Image (cartoon, rainbow, N blue to C red):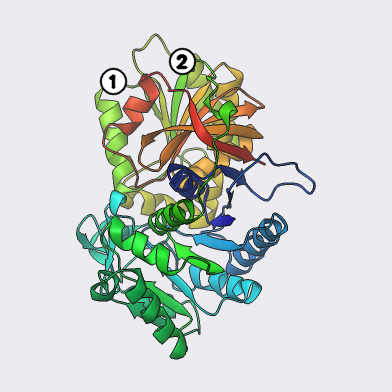
């Protein structure tokens, strides 16, 4: 069995979908489930955390708690899922979490890559490319919390760990899984604990997945997870789908878009939504730093809305210059706490008013919404965009949730998701705590 630990909620959904596409019966949990929880039949487990931006020691503790629970469920292959743009600071949390998981699993080495070609993230000669340009030349250069100013993954990872880091170049990967396996053995003989593998296409990821089949620990974005899952499904066939997962949960007509990501893609999606005429309200923490009062203002605005052909948008997403102004005035951590608390209160208030389709943009935003709504169960349905699935709750409020990573989705995603009917669920169950 394979088990993944994801460092944010949207990433957890992304990797669960990757397993699902390969035919693996997949359960997704937001947080470690309580002791004694009975699980339906499954082939893969995913525990999604909010550990990307927190202090390293907390990220390590949460990841080890997840590891221990997964091990109790008889997981034998562990996967640490991080962002395809390698989001992290110079101190972590990718390196520290991997160091802890290596000790826990006893892995001799960890093969990894953030490559996810379907999201236009590729690794070549150890450099990460985003939308065909180097990571350091992409929009991630100006990320407000984790600015990525270096594209060399070996250097980035060496800054977060004392372990030796190696590279399997694309010329080797292109020769197939046997060549990759031999290169991994050579890297291990040199004492390299973390082995970055180049990948520019899905065939590369499948070759890497075949080469590491049976390894106790691997890491990367959803691309390598998909490659590994496809190998598991091919070499260990016979997985059956859960017939209950195809049950239709009906229509979800009252929509709202809640956006907190300041990524370039989310800002474009918001602009498109506003240009179509969607009514919008900005959560501005500098005007009202009290999250309860700020949320109350947004809900009052919603209550006074007239008829509209478009779902309302409530957002805190702003351009980099405006974000820096907010952070300079309030501080990075305080501004984030205010806005996440406010957006969670807004989500709860709107669901109380009958909203049953919630579209969220941003990993931290999605985490705040899931926590505030106290969702305890659901199933994953069709993808509104690659790696962005609908989550249909089965306990608690009856909702359709779309948790979108900031950089994911086409220009029209938010508009399309808030207006079109939601398709029936697919074959992945998701449980949140």
Figure check: 58 above or below 163 = above
Q: Nearest the camera: 270 or 205?
A: 205
- Label 2 vs label 1, nearer the camera: 2
How many C-alpha atoms fall within 10 Å of the one at disc 1: few (<14), some, or many (≥20)?
Answer: few
Left or right placement of residue 239 versus residue 253 in this view: right
Q: Position of residue 26 (x, y in %)?
A: 56, 44
Answer yes or no: is residue 73 visible: yes
Residue drawn 44% across and 52% down? 234
- In the rendered view, would you say 268 is above or below 51? above
Q: How many marks?
A: 2
Residue beneath disc 2:
253
- Locate the N terminus by quadrant: bottom right
Q: Name the spot of residue 160 as percent of width and height, x first.
A: 48, 76
Q: In the rendering, which numbered label is found on residue 277? A: 1
Q: SS class of the residue under badge 2?
A: loop
Compare residues 35 and 316 and report the one nearer the observer. 35
């Amino acid at each position: 069995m394979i088990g993944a630990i994801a460092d944010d909620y949207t990433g957890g959904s992304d990797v669960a979908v990757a397993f699902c596409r390969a035919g693996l019966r997949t359960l997704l949990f937001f947080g470690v489930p309580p002791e004694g929880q009975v699980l339906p039949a499954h082939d893969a487990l995913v525990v999604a955390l909010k550990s990307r931006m927190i202090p390293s020691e907390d990220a390590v503790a949460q990841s080890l708690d997840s590891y221990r629970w997964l091990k109790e469920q008889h997981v034998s292959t562990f996967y640490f899922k991080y962002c395809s743009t390698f989001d992290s600071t110079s101190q972590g949390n990718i390196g520290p979490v991997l160091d802890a998981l290596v000790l826990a699993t006893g892995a001799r080495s960890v093969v990894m890559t953030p490559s996810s070609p379907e999201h236009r993230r590729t690794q070549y000669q150890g450099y990460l490319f985003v939308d065909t340009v180097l990571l350091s030349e992409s929009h991630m250069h100006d990320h407000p919390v984790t600015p990525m100013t270096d594209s060399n993954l070996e250097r980035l990872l060496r800054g977060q760990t004392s372990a030796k880091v190696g590279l399997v170049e694309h010329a080797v990967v292109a020769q197939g899984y046997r060549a990759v396996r031999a290169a991994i053995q050579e890297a291990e003989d040199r004492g390299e604990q973390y082995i970055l593998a180049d990948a520019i296409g899905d065939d590369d990821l499948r070759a890497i997945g075949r080469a590491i089949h049976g390894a106790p620990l691997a890491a990367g974005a959803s691309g390598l997870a998909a490659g590994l899952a496809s190998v598991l499904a091919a070499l260990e066939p016979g997985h059956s789908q859960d017939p209950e997962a195809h049950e239709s949960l009906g229509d979800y007509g009252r929509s709202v878009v809640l956006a907190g990501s300041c990524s370039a893609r989310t800002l474009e999606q918001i602009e498109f939504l506003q240009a179509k005429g969607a009514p919008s309200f900005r959560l501005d923490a500098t005007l009202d730093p009290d999250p309860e009062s700020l949320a109350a203002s947004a809900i009052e605005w919603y209550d006074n809305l007239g008829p509209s052909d478009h779902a309302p948008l409530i957002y805190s997403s702003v351009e980099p210059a405006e974000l820096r102004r907010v952070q300079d005035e309030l501080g990075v951590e305080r501004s984030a706490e205010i806005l996440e608390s406010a957006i969670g209160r807004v989500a709860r208030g709107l669901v109380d008013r009958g909203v049953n389709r919630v579209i969220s943009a941003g990993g931290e935003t999605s985490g705040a919404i899931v926590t505030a709504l106290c969702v305890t169960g659901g199933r994953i349905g069709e993808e509104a965009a690659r790696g962005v699935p609908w989550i249909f709750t089965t306990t608690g409020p009856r909702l359709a949730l779309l948790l979108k990573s900031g950089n994911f989705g086409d220009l029209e995603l938010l508009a399309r998701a808030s207006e079109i009917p939601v398709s029936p669920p697919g074959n992945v169950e998701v449980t949140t705590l």
